[in-house]
Image (tube, rainbow, N blue to C red):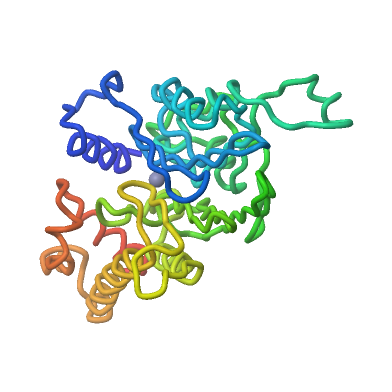
């Protein structure tokens, strides 16, 4: 949590000039159309993906609770006031699930038959996530606040792939084991041709491998390769399948390939050092990320945290 908080505050401070104090008053929500009725909303915390149509609104990730009013207002403006039906969580971190409770209460699930009787009318939006997100919420780590009941996922799955058909579009939720955490999913909008990646991919820095929550470097690389397998570039141009990162700007396949190559090269360097029985201190002193630190490691301690996470999850002693 502390690692994630530092990354978030660092990114926020760089992006908006805010000081250390967490104050969301001045944060504006910006909406970027990605393709068709899929938008990326940028405020504070992780990027939010919004898809809307006749069935209502589906969002991927909910930023921080303090951002909920502004996000809901922007979504109402974009969608013409359509109800929030689904919330999808890419993983458990607070900057991606903080608004869950507000979105659930503001929303209105489509229910019918026995289910409608059971829930007695409006039960709020439904929240879908991998089972491990629920398990992590139920057992918060040190420094992690308890999760309110209404913020928990209502629909969890524990297999590799989960599907939903919404607004004439097939969505796939693809589990990526032991990547950024142990509960990451990619959200693939098949008709709009957009992938929302959560924090397996970002454009602002090295990936954060949350070792305490089951993340590993090889899982991150597997996840990046899954994104690359799903994306198709437009012929000889930029574009094609669009990628919404956990943090940063909208990308296409070429951006993800460059990032995957960078992560893989640094992983391979650390592996070579482990093979030579180098200690963590020796590896850190050798700075295996040095040629990329200017681009990806500008926040304080980011290169060291990244290299240490690689070292530990590759089994370095
Ligand atoms: Zn995260």
Residue 101 located left or right of residue 216: right
Residue 13 located left or right of residue 55: left
Residue 9 located left or right of residue 313: left
Q: Is residue 234 above or below residue 30?
A: below
**Image position, residue 96 (x, y; %):** 44, 38
Q: Quadrant of ligand 1?
A: top left
Q: Is residue 205 above or below residue 281?
A: above
Look at the image and tell me whether residue 20 can be seen.
yes
Please name whichever residue, 184 or 201, is drawn nearer the observer in this view of the structure: 201
Please name whichever residue, 11 or 3, is drawn nearer the observer in this view of the structure: 11
Residue 125 located left or right of residue 23: right
Residue placed farthest to the right in the image?
Answer: 114
Q: Is residue 86 above or below residue 315?
A: above
**Image position, residue 317 (x, y; %):** 30, 67
Please name whichever residue, 262 or 149, is drawn nearer the observer in this view of the structure: 262
Q: Residue at x 26, y 69 (%)?
A: 262
The quadrant holding residue 70 is top left
The quadrant holding residue 284 is bottom left
Q: Is residue 144 above or below residue 228?
A: above
**Image position, residue 174 (x, y; %):** 57, 58
Q: Residue at x 59, y 35 (%)?
A: 57
**Image position, residue 1 (x, y; %):** 36, 39
């Amino acid at each position: 949590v502390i690692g994630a908080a530092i990354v978030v505050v660092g990114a926020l401070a760089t992006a908006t000039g805010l000081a250390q104090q967490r104050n969301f008053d001045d944060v504006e929500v910006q909406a970027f159309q990605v393709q068709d009725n899929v938008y990326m909303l940028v405020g504070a915390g992780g990027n939010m993906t919004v898809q809307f149509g006749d069935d209502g609104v589906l969002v991927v990730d909910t930023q921080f609770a303090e951002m909920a009013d502004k996000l809901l207002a922007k979504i109402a403006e974009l969608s013409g006031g359509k109800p929030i039906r689904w919330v999808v969580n890419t993983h458990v971190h607070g900057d991606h699930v903080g608004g869950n409770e507000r979105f659930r209460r503001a929303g209105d699930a489509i229910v019918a038959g026995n289910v409608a009787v059971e829930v007695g009318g409006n039960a709020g939006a439904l929240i879908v996530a991998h089972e491990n997100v629920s398990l992590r919420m139920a057992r918060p780590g040190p420094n992690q606040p308890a999760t309110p009941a209404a913020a928990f996922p209502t629909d969890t799955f524990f297999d590799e792939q989960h599907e939903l058909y919404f607004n004439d579009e097939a969505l796939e939720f693809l589990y990526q084991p032991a990547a950024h955490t142990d509960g990451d999913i990619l959200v693939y909008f098949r008709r709009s041709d957009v992938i929302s990646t959560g924090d397996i991919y970002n454009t602002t820095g090295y990936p954060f491998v949350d070792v305490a929550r089951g993340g590993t470097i090889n899982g991150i690389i597997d996840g990046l390769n899954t994104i690359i397998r799903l994306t198709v570039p437009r012929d000889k141009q930029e574009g094609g399948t669009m990628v919404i990162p956990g943090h940063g700007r909208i990308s296409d396949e070429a951006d993800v390939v460059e990032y995957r190559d960078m992560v893989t090269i640094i992983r391979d360097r650390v592996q070579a050092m482990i093979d030579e029985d180098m200690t963590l201190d020796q590896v850190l002193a050798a700075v295996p990320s040095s040629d990329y630190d200017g681009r990806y490691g500008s926040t304080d301690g980011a290169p060291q945290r990244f290299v240490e996470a690689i070292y530990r999850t590759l089994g370095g002693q």
